[in-house]
Amino acid sequence: MKTRVVITSMGFITSMGNSELEVMNRFQTDTVGFRFDDDYQRVPVCPVQDFDLRQYTGRLKNRRYLNRGAGFCVAAAILATRDGKTSNRELSHAGLFTGTGPNFDISSECGEIVHGDLDHSSLQALWMLRFLPNTASSIISEILGIHGENATINTACSASLQAIGEAYRRIKDGYLEIALAGGGDSRLSKGGILAYQKAKALFIGEGDPCTLYSTFDEKRDGFVPGEGGAFFVLEELSCAEKRNAPIIGEVCGFGCSLDGWNMTAPEPKGIWGEKAVRHALKEADVRPMDIDLVTAHGTGTLLNDQMEAALIHRIFSEKQPFVISLKSWIGHLAAACGAVETAITLLCMNNSFLPKIRNLKRPCAPDINLVLENREAQANLALIQSFGFGGQNSALVVRKWKK
Amino acid sequence: MNIFETVKQIVADILDIEEEKILIQTYLIRDLGAESIDLLELAVSLNAGFQIEIKDDDIFLRKLRRYLEEAKEKSLDQHSYLAGQYPFLSASRIGEILRVLEGGPVLTIEDLVSYIFYYQNNVDRT
């Protein structure tokens, strides 16, 4: 019999809040946290206000080695295990799969570089740890006592969805009974904004920052960077049942692929993205017409949304599922987007609710079922898509849990 | 602010502990659990905080046990040998170090303070 993998706990930190109640309330009241960046004043960003890592870790000297994105990883992993239902013994055998991004916060390390000399008296001895991709994983394992199979995944904006997929596969294939998976990221630093601004990938505008940004709009013109993190406890169904763990949803299938096309632009037709999606559907043993909801990658860049709309239209030719785009609510969380959007998708499914795509006035793809107004709807099977720089594609199928 | 107060602040910050836990006679490794990477950070911060060159091996008494072996091999008095290697430590502190050796790493906050005081007042270290 096929091994089933379920999600029994999740923790998330977003600009819309850290709990189901807060996030659902933000949806209902149409409240979002977009504002203009302090340094780049025409660049809207979507920060997590008042994030204090210490609130999650307590006193912890190694906190100094976490960049902001890695801090979101650690905080979300702590939240995902905080209910105490996962015992220390279970955690010690658990796997750990972490999606992280690069640290672009260069100016915090070397604010002033004189004659190429990077060293200065306040540069920490081990400042490099804030740039190593696996520092978050190392600190999570230390705090939670996790010692099992693991991987840190750095596949750009596809990373955290891929981390969940990898954890799912290791459990499905019998390497692990239980695993923690997710990711965290922030590009909201001088270096981060500079990077995407120079790449001409950012939305730039004037006016009320909360009404500007949309995805899948004909006038879309770049993404708005956000930040946050989410982690999940994934486990084999029998393991969850044995310990009476509450089940939030089931991970049914995963797929990933590489475009082999361009360093930043997606392959225009989404041929290889489609391969990832079809693989996930096949692994979930479902037909395209069984999918009720697609959580699109939907960045608001010209090329992504065009490619993604075509891909969705093609795959779901028999029956178009609802398409939501959570970046219009929280911005683009880079490496963390897949995990955070999976968490919010599960919240929506369990509340029989679909959030509108904010600020969408002129849909660029009338032939797909973009959700234009908040609505009640049952969605039993959802597909989450992430497409990252470098042609990194990943897709995850989740099912709403029915007792 | 005196040297001890500043050292206390720096150590508390690096180890993320309350300043009240740090007394002049507190052992850095035995009592506060400082690890090797913490000492690396401490050296950098003390250097920045006091504007003097911190030699890790000296301030953290890293070669203490090797020096004791050397003294034994050369049939020299351990106390005077250590006093030669660590001119910043008082004779009474060296006596105390020799008495508590068995209990583990001997480094105290006082040793850091002594080092800084000594080299702030003895610029020529050659």
Image (cartoon, grey):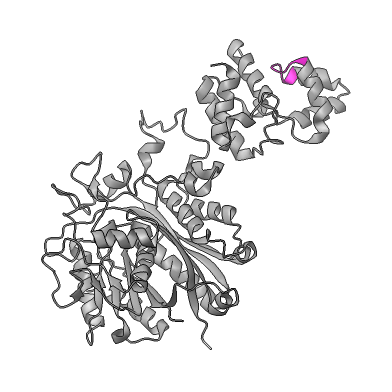
Q: Which residues, given as a range, are shown in magenta?
A: B84-91
Residue A145 to residue A194: above or below: below
Give yes or no for residue B90 being in the magenta stretch.
yes
Residue A338 to residue B63: above or below: below
Q: Residue A393's quadrant in the figure?
A: bottom left
Is B44 in front, or is B81? B44
Q: Residue B72's quadrant in the figure?
A: top right
Query: Main SS type for the magenta part?
Result: loop
Residue A271: x %, y % from top left: 27, 76
Which residue sits at x=37%, y=43%?
A: A105
Residue A55: x %, y % from top left: 48, 46
Classify residue A353 as left or right of residue A255.
Answer: left
Classify residue A123 as left or right of residue A111.
Answer: right
Which residue sits at x=37%, y=41%?
A: A106
Residue A366: x %, y % from top left: 13, 75
Give yes or no for residue A344 being in the magenta stretch.
no
Residue A186: x %, y % from top left: 36, 51
Which residue sits at x=25%, y=39%?
A: A38
Q: Specify whether residue A272 is in view.
A: yes
Classify residue B95 as left or right of residue A47.
Answer: right
Q: Residue B75's quadrant in the figure?
A: top right
Q: Specify whether residue B70 is in view.
A: no
Is A93 in front, or is A14? A14
